[in-house]
Image: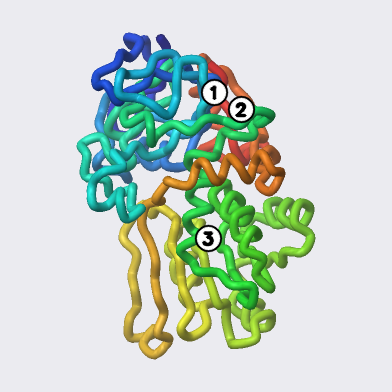
C-alpha cells in the first residue's frame, strides 16, 4: 500500500509499505476513506517533535471503515464507519481513569498514531486500543463532516472545556487557523458574552466575520487596546492561544485581565519565555499541554445535531498519490488554504 512516511529531519516520502496486520487482540485495521494534513505533521518534518520515529507513516486526522477487529474489541465491528482519535489510550491506567488520556501510560498510549507508530496518510492503518481510539460515525454524518472530530475538534472542545468559560465572560482567541477555527466553534457552544478573535491575516479575519458575524476580530498590533476597550475588567476573562508563536504567547498573558485563565493549545517550535517579574500580581492561571481527546462521541453527536460545522475549513482535496503537492500547498499557505483533505 502507499504510505506517506517521515524519512528523516526535513524529509517525507510516499513509499510502498506492507498493509498493517493485527498485533494485539485490542487492535483494529481501518481502511482509510479520508485523511487530512495537520500542522503537527509539519512539526514532525521540521524536527520539533523529538519523539517522532524516523520511518513512521505520518497522519492522525482521518476517518475510515473498520476492516478487521481483534478478538477483544467490542465497541466497533467490521464494516463500521469510524472517526479515528488522535490519541490511542488504554482506558484503564491512572491517567485514563482521570480523563487525562494524553498521558496514558500504555506504550501505545497518548499521541502515537503518525508519530511513534504508523498513522493514517496511507490506505490502511492499525489502531491500537480500538475500543477507545475509534468512534462510530452517526448515520447522516459524512466523512468530510466527521474528518476533524478526532483531532482538531477534539482539541478545540478540550480547550473550551478546561478554560471554564461562563456566560459572563469575554473570551479572546488568538489564531484563526485550523485549530483556532475549530476552537472557536467549541467556544461558541459555551455562549460567552463576547468573543474576540485575534488574527494577523486579513483574509482570515474577513472569513471569521463572514461565518461568525457576531464575533469581533482584530489584528495583533491593535489587540491589547481593543481587548481592553471591549472588556469590562481591563482584559479578557479567558484567553486561548492557538497560534503558536513567541509574539502570540506574550500577547496571551498581556491581554488577560487579573485572575484570568490563559489556555495554551498551540504547539511551539522553540521554548517560550514566561516573564514572571512583569506578570507578578496578575495572578493568572495557565493551562497547557496536549489535548485529552476523549470527547469524540459527544463531538460527533453535536455534528449530527448541526451544532458543530467544520465543512468550510476544507478548502482543497488531493489524492494520496499527490500528497507531496498537498503538503507544499499547506506548508506555504498558498491559494487561501485552510485544510486539505486527502483521499486514498
Q: Residue furthest bottom?
A: 281
Q: Nearer the viewer, residue 93 or 145?
A: 93
Classify 10 Å Cα crowding around label 1: few (below 14), some (14-19), many (20 and above): many
Q: Residue at x 31, y 39 (%)?
A: 89
- In the picture of the structure, the residue carrying the numbered disc 3 is 160
Q: Who is closer to the viewer here, 104 or 270?
A: 104
Q: Position of residue 14 (x, y in %)?
A: 41, 17
Name the residue carrying label 1: 81
Above or below 341: residue 178: below
Instruction: Give the mark toward the camera: 1 or 2.
Output: 1
Relative to 79, say whether 239 is above or below: below
Q: Secondary structure at mark 2?
A: helix
Helix, strand or loop at label 1? It is strand
Image quadrant where residue 200 sits: bottom right
- In front here: 37 or 125? 125
Q: Position of residue 75 (x, y in %)?
A: 42, 29
Q: Which of marks 2 and 1 precedes in the sequence?
A: 1
What's the residue at 33%, 40% (across, down)? 111
Say whether disc 2 or disc 3 marks the residue closer to the N-terminus: 2
Residue at (27% x, 52% y) in the render: 95
Element at label 3: helix
Tell whether 235 sits left or right of 39.
right
Determine if residue 253 is in view.
yes
Q: Alpha-carbon distance for marks 2 and 3?
A: 24 Å
Q: Is residue 13 visible?
A: no
Looking at the rendering, in which quadrant would you find the N terminus? top left
Check if mark 1's residue and mark 2's residue have beta carbons within 8 Å. Answer: yes
Residue bearing mark 2: 143
Look at the picture and state if 287 lies above or below 71.
below
Amino acid at each position: 500500500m502507499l504510505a506517506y512516511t517521515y524519512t528523516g529531519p526535513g524529509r517525507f516520502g510516499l513509499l510502498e509499505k506492507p498493509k498493517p496486520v493485527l498485533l494485539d487482540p485490542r487492535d483494529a485495521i481501518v481502511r482509510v476513506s479520508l485523511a487530512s494534513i495537520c500542522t503537527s505533521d509539519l512539526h514532525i518534518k521540521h524536527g520539533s517533535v523529538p519523539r517522532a520515529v524516523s520511518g513512521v507513516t505520518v497522519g492522525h486526522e482521518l476517518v475510515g471503515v473498520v476492516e478487521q477487529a481483534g478478538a477483544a474489541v467490542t465497541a466497533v465491528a467490521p464494516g463500521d464507519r469510524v472517526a479515528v482519535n488522535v490519541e490511542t489510550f488504554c482506558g484503564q491506567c491512572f491517567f485514563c481513569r482521570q480523563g487525562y488520556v494524553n498521558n496514558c501510560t500504555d506504550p501505545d498510549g497518548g499521541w502515537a498514531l503518525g508519530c511513534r507508530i504508523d498513522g493514517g496518510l496511507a490506505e490502511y492503518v492499525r489502531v491500537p486500543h480500538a475500543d477507545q481510539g475509534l468512534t462510530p460515525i452517526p448515520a447522516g454524518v459524512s466523512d468530510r463532516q466527521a474528518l476533524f472530530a478526532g483531532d482538531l475538534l477534539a482539541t478545540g472542545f478540550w480547550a473550551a472545556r478546561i478554560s471554564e468559560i461562563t456566560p459572563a465572560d469575554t473570551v479572546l482567541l488568538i489564531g484563526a487557523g485550523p485549530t483556532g477555527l475549530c476552537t472557536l466553534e467549541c467556544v461558541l457552544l459555551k455562549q460567552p458574552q463576547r468573543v474576540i478573535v485575534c488574527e494577523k491575516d486579513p483574509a482570515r479575519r474577513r472569513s471569521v466575520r463572514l461565518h461568525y458575524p457576531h464575533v469581533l476580530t482584530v489584528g495583533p498590533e491593535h489587540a491589547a487596546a481593543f481587548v481592553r476597550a471591549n472588556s469590562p475588567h481591563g482584559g479578557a476573562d479567558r484567553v486561548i492561544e492557538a497560534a503558536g508563536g513567541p509574539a502570540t504567547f506574550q500577547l496571551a498573558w498581556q491581554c488577560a485581565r487579573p485572575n484570568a485563565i490563559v489556555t495554551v493549545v498551540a504547539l511551539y517550535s522553540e521554548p517560550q519565555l514566561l516573564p514572571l517579574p512583569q506578570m507578578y500580581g496578575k495572578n493568572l492561571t495557565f493551562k497547557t499541554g496536549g489535548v485529552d481527546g476523549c470527547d469524540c462521541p459527544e463531538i460527533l453527536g453535536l455534528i449530527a445535531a448541526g451544532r458543530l460545522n467544520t465543512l468550510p475549513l476544507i478548502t482543497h482535496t488531493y489524492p494520496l498519490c499527490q500528497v507531496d503537492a498537498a503538503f507544499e500547498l499547506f506548508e506555504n499557505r498558498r491559494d487561501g488554504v485552510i485544510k486539505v483533505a486527502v483521499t486514498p
